[in-house]
Amino acid sequence: MKDGMTELAWFKSSYSGSQGDDCVEVAIVEQAVHVRDSKDVTRPSFAVGREGWGQFVRFASER
């Protein structure tokens, strides 16, 4: 990464299919969770606060 930042450690959810389609990857750091499309990792990622990510995961797990 640029500006002295360390490389993010990306991982896929255990719920991701084995075919690799329709997946996201996340990288968790102290203040945020970074999210990117696993099919095209060259596209920009986005970051969300850890509290917001937790709310999203709880919402998604209820579905």
Image (cartoon, rainbow, N blue to C red):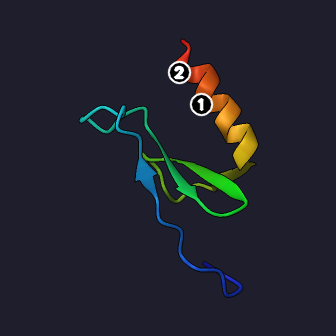
Q: Amino acid at mark 2?
A: Ser
Residue that lies at the very extreme toward the bottom in this rendered image: 4
In the rendered structure, are the residues bearing label 1 and label 2 in contact, judged by CB atoms less than 8 Å apart?
A: yes
Q: Please state the horizontal and vertical placement of residue 50, each as a whole percent of the image.
A: 70, 48
Give the labeled residue for mark 1.
57
x and y percent of residue 6 in the render? Answer: 58, 80
The amino acid marked with disc number 1 is Val
Q: Could you say whether the residue bearing mark 1 is in a helix, strand or loop?
A: helix
Q: 45 and 14: which one is in front?
A: 14
Q: Is residue 24 left or right of 16 when viewed as pictured?
A: right
Q: Is residue 39 left or right of residue 56?
A: left
As drawn, 7 above or below 41: below
Question: Residue 61: where, in percent of width, then height?
Answer: 53, 21
- Front residue (pair 62, 45): 62
> Which residue is located at x 63 percent, y 56 percent?
44
| Residue for point 64% across, 52% down | 33
| Residue 28 at x, y percent in the picture | 58, 57
Quadrant, the C terminus = top right
Extreme top residue here?
Answer: 63
The quarter of the rendered structure image containing the N terminus is bottom right
User: Which mark, by number, is residue 26?
Assistant: none
The residue carrying pointer 2 sits among few (fewer than 14), some (14 to 19) or many (20 or more) residues within 10 Å by Cα, namely: few
SS assignment at label 2: helix
- In the rendered image, the vertical position of residue 12 relative to residue 21, given as above or below: below
Left-right relation of 50 to 37:
right
Q: Residue at x 25, y 35 (%)?
A: 19
Q: Which residue is mark 2?
A: 61
Instruction: Classify 45 as above or below 6.
Output: above
Mark 1 and mark 2: span between their CA atoms? 6 Å
